[in-house]
Amino acid sequence: MDTSGMYVGLDIGTTSIKVIVAEYLEGQLNVLGVGNERAAGLSRGVIVDIDKASEAIKRAVKAAEEKASIQIHDVIVGISANMLKIEPVTGMIAIGDQAREITDQDVRDVAAAAIIQNLPPEREIINLVPDEFIVDGFDGIKDPRSMVGVRLEMNGMLFTGPKTIVHNTRKAVEQAGLNAQLAVVSPIAQGLSILSDGEQDFGTILLDLGGGQSTAAVIHDHRLKFAEVDPEGGDYITKDISVVLNTSIENAEKLKRNYGYADSSRASEDNQFPVDVVGQSRPSDISEKYLAEIIEARLMQILEKLKTQLTATNALSLPGGIVLTGGVAALPGITDLAQEVFDVPVRVSIPDQMGLRHPSFTQALSLVNYRGQMSEVALLVQSALAGNDQLVSQIDSQPEPQQSVEVSDSRHTKPAQSRTDKPKKQRGQGIKKFFTEFFD
């Protein structure tokens, strides 16, 4: 099978590992295979056991291989934004004593010049994204190749992360028998894939509510400007349910998925369901509203903490509002709750791909889409980081930039209703005292 234009996205999450095989044909992203397996060896979005993580990756890859009928060797892997550092960099090289045409190698050389710096030993470069090239003083150039000049400069953004996180991710991928041909800071890929051009330009906040952690990222001027990670996510909600209702983690997860609401005002006191309680021979009946209060209490804490960070950067004044994604974003009522906390427009991004219409698949799809839309210049710049000749060799077969993965937006969903008649102080009064002590 011809695999040119075919890419594999690998999303290594705390609760699940997702692998998506897709190709571009006639301007469309076609998903050929999907693997979705329970994760192992991760805690709060970070790999803490490479052996367990690599085995889980193998299982997800095998499932995707069987559905796509191909063998997977190369993957695009997402790197979490934990302790991410973003800084502008500049590089400059002399083309020669006399003007000549700028080549692919010149682009790689100027990118390499931009990253010549003394990185702290505990940090590692993840991505280098070019903003513009300057040829003999003429700026704003996106692709300098074939132009004539004697001096080439590049301005870009450098993204670095903790060496432990990056190394463990690459090692787990390698141990699973795969080659990480490209690593991408997760919010960069998501921003390109699920935000419209206007949202990326004027400024939008991405909230990725995952199982192991929650990430707030600010996209402005088509760049990732800020990222903050809160080490709490859907797993914490599940643990809260388990502790409060005195039931197993497995039962708590089922309750969250089958009966959970993010917004307790939308849940009913009359709707009740049985819960297996540890130490009791018979199940206890729990109301839908009580379960929602447990869920809402933890979500309010997560969102309020992220709000503090976003307020400090003045991000909530950006016109794009907030776009929610990640598995927790599937909880009914999450849009209303987030709008109440942040007081800005909120929508949930859900992939339109058949069989993947769940926000937990957004990241894996974004990785594939990001790679498919990378320009030749972007590939050359990224290849300069570690002398990745494989990326360079792909340029000749690079397909034309394609359209983004289509995702649902607020125009296709019912507008959120105003919540001004429901003050926060009235929320979850029945368990407010318990959670005040529990979270502390």
Image: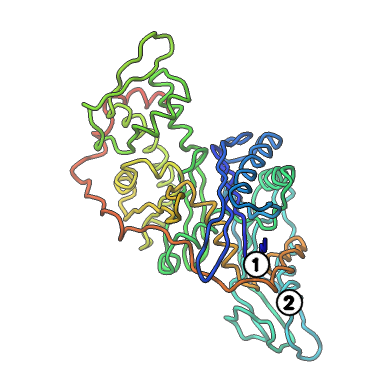
The residue carrying pointer 1 sits among few (fewer than 14), some (14 to 19) or many (20 or more) residues within 10 Å by Cα, namely many
The residue carrying pointer 2 sits among few (fewer than 14), some (14 to 19) or many (20 or more) residues within 10 Å by Cα, namely some
Residue at 58 percent of width and 62 percent of height: 23
Out of 32 and 103, give the one closest to the viewer.
32
SS at badge 1: strand
Q: With respect to residue 147, does 257 lie above or below?
A: above
Snapshot colouring: rainbow
SS at badge 2: helix
For this view, does 341 lie left or right of residue 123?
A: left
Pointer 1 with pointer 2, Cβ within 8 A = no
Residue at 60 percent of width and 68 percent of height: 374
Image disc number at residue 259: none
| Quarter of the figure with residue 395 | bottom right
Residue at 81 percent of width and 88 percent of height: 97
**Outermost residue to the left:** 421
For this view, does 333 lie left or right of residue 178?
A: left
| Image coordinates for residue 335, horizontal then vertical, percent | 33, 47
The residue carrying mark 1 is 89
Three-letter code, disc 1: Val
Q: With respect to residue 289, does 3 lie above or below?
A: below
Q: With respect to residue 93, does 195 lie above or below?
A: above
Image disc number at residue 104: 2
**Outermost residue to the bottom:** 98
For this view, does 19 lie left or right of residue 281?
A: right
